[in-house]
Amino acid sequence: MNQFIRTVAVAMLAATASSAYAQANVTVKDAWVRATVPQQKATGAFMQLQAAKDSKFVSASSPLTPAVEVHEMAMQGDVMRMRQVQSVELPAGKTVELKPGGYHIMMMNLKAQVKEGDTVPFTLVFEGKDGKREQVEIQAPVKALNSAAKPAHAGH
Amino acid sequence: MNQRISNNRVSNPGSRRAFVLSGAALALGVLAGCSMGSSVSFNGTDITGADFGRDFRLKDPSGQERTLADFKDKVVLVFFGFTQCPDVCPTALARAAEVKTLLGPDGDRLQVLFVSVDPERDTPEVLNAYTAAFDPTFLALYGDAERLAETAKEFKVIYQKVPTGDSYTIDHTSVTYAYDTNGKLRLKLSHSQSAIEYAADVRKLLHAA
């Protein structure tokens, strides 16, 4: 009986903890930033996003530069076009990849070289269907400039 | 290896015996994307005889003026881009580096040229460091605004500045052109094609010369 009570208590605690955590409904995985060479003023950040509830990714910021935008790359015929987007839809439970060939976080006007092995902090802002916003802080490792696009993951 | 076989078929166009001799050769040829015809087929679009992309006159980061003739006896891959491009440009250069690796010893006979469409920001120092990060033999080329405009026109390449925030990005054509060892434009490859597809075509160009 004691054991039972303890188990229930632990379960309730876990439930409380996870529901508190669930407010941060977005999970960020495999974030990385492409390294730059000296005097190169811009680069991209890539990651996987998954939201428990229908949400959208609305903005990103970083102490490295005030010029951080969410961009989408699209091919029109043979021409590569890159545009800032207002948001990226995150349907509930679906992993949305920010990767070469699609979306990326564009960092511009960099003041210093971003070196392989460094870590870049980002604050990502998400918005739920109810208009409520949440912030997620991440630390993205910097990978070599010549890092190839990660192969697309299965399941979408 | 299979490209050598394909090559035999090219150098003996119409030779039935080449087909009959080795079913394995044919199977390999088919695997390599060869058609049943007498001419070799490529993953890229064959534009042999094109009346564009004939030559360029651009500077390398050391300030030396370069033309296609400087790369004779090599297969040359040319594409346009800019260093502040976070997506297609590093992807294209990383693929080119992979192509060189896939070619093995033949990789020494590949020259990759990266033509900047952003002469304002792509200084020789940035260009040199940028291409070297992918492969020390890759060469960046640039010209002033007029020379770039002429070159892009000759190569049917579009580039357009697009303001974003207080900076700008550049929309640009993302094809790769491949020249044979005689400096003749032969292929147009797409950004969506893989390093393996590129390498197969380069190998054919190297061994069909």
Image: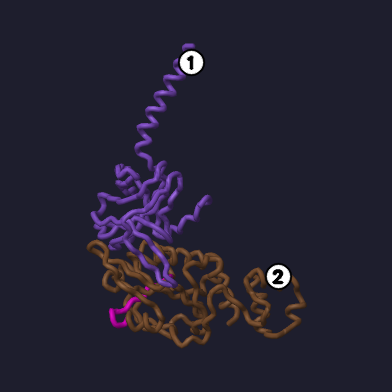
Chain colours: A purple, B brown
Q: Quadrant of the C terminus of chain B?
A: bottom right
- Say few, some or many: other residues with alpha carbon within 10 Å of mark 2 (under 14 / 14 to 19 / 20 or more): some
Q: Nearer the viewer, residue B171 or B146?
A: B171
Q: Quadrant of the N terminus of chain B?
A: bottom right
- What distance separates the C-alpha of mark 1 from that of mark 2? 68 Å
Q: Are marks 1 and 2 in contact (CB under 8 Å)?
A: no
Residue A29 visible in the current orientation? no
- Say few, some or many: other residues with alpha carbon within 10 Å of mark 1 (under 14 / 14 to 19 / 20 or more): few
Looking at the image, residue B45 lies above or below residue B54: above
- Residue range of the region highlighted in magenta in the rendering: B138-147
Q: Which residue is mark 1?
A: A4
Q: Chain of mark 1?
A: A
SS of the residue at dot 1?
Answer: helix
Residue A85 place in picture, x, y as percent: 33, 58
Residue B131 place in picture, x, y as percent: 39, 67
Q: Is residue B51 magenta?
A: no
